Amino acid sequence: MLKTKQFRYHLDNLGYLVYGRENALAIDGGAFTAILSFLKENALRLLYVANTHDHIDHTSGNAALIDKANALFLPNEKICDRTIELEGETIKVYHTPGHTRNSLCFHHDDVLITGDTLFNGTIGNCFSGDLKGFYHSMKKIMSLPADTVIYAGHDYVEDALVFAKRLEPGNKFIETYRKNYSSSHVYSRLADELRVNPYLRFNEPGIIGLLKKNKLPTKSEWQRWQSLMTID
């Protein structure tokens, strides 16, 4: 089984190292100094460098990692909806457009690295303008096992829970989610997101009622998703 190590950098960025006994893959390696130190301390060889999407805060460590570790860069268009093999284990790469057109999620074992597609407690901005693509990306993620660990590209948990509480003040799971949060290791389970994250709760009666109260369309799931994306 592969392991995943989270690295915090800048103010709230989160990058990752997926590794086995000898080899590793860096995803959004902006914390390149810490990553290189971890590789050396654990006698790991960095084989690949990849990104969840091409925004500079996620790609800023690429050059240093490629140069200092002699790693191979994996462009998004080459690995989209394909797999990466690492020490005989498979990392599935899903195309999840919405935040950007080339956004990817990386899935191994019970771990999903989501970048800025799905945050813990919220979602990314739809900078691509592809709202329907974003909807299908959410549906793809929502179809995964409930115990899937969500590792996101930023730590926006505190602000996300304030927003979730405003939309569903009676949601008892929000406070439990808050108590389980730690800035030193930011993660959740998909089951947690389905209980708390408003953008995955467009079929819940409370959210549907909120949309109706705001006189927004709710007849279909797609309409509810569009309507929810207009709430601020």
Image (spheres, rainbow, N blue to C red):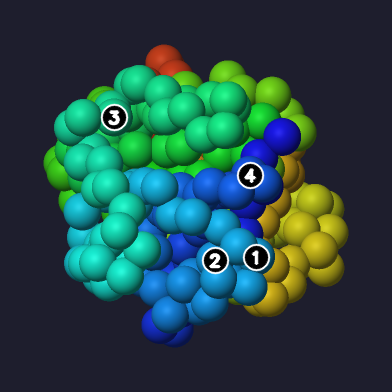
- Image spot of residue 104 (x, y percent): 34, 38
Q: Earlier in the sequence, mark 3 or mark 2?
A: 2
The amino acid marked with disc number 4 is: Gly
- Image spot of residue 16 (x, y percent): 51, 58
Q: Secondary structure at mark 1?
A: loop
Label 1 to label 2: alpha-carbon separation: 5 Å
User: Is residue 191 found left or right of 219 in the rendered image?
Assistant: right
Q: Which mark is residue 42?
A: 1
Badge 4: how crowded within 10 Å, few (<14), some, or many (20+)?
A: some
Q: Earlier in the sequence, mark 4 or mark 1?
A: 4
Residue named by callout 4 = 20
User: Is residue 155 found left or right of 33 in the rendered image?
Assistant: right
Label 4 to label 1: alpha-carbon separation: 10 Å
User: Is residue 161 found left or right of 102 in the rendered image?
Assistant: right
Q: Secondary structure at mark 3?
A: helix
Q: What residue do we see at 63% from left, 73% from top?
A: 41
Looking at the picture, does residue 35 appear above or below residue 85?
below
Badge 3: how crowded within 10 Å, few (<14), some, or many (20+)?
A: some
Residue named by callout 2 = 39
Q: What residue do we see at 37% from left, 47% from top?
A: 48
Residue named by callout 3 = 79
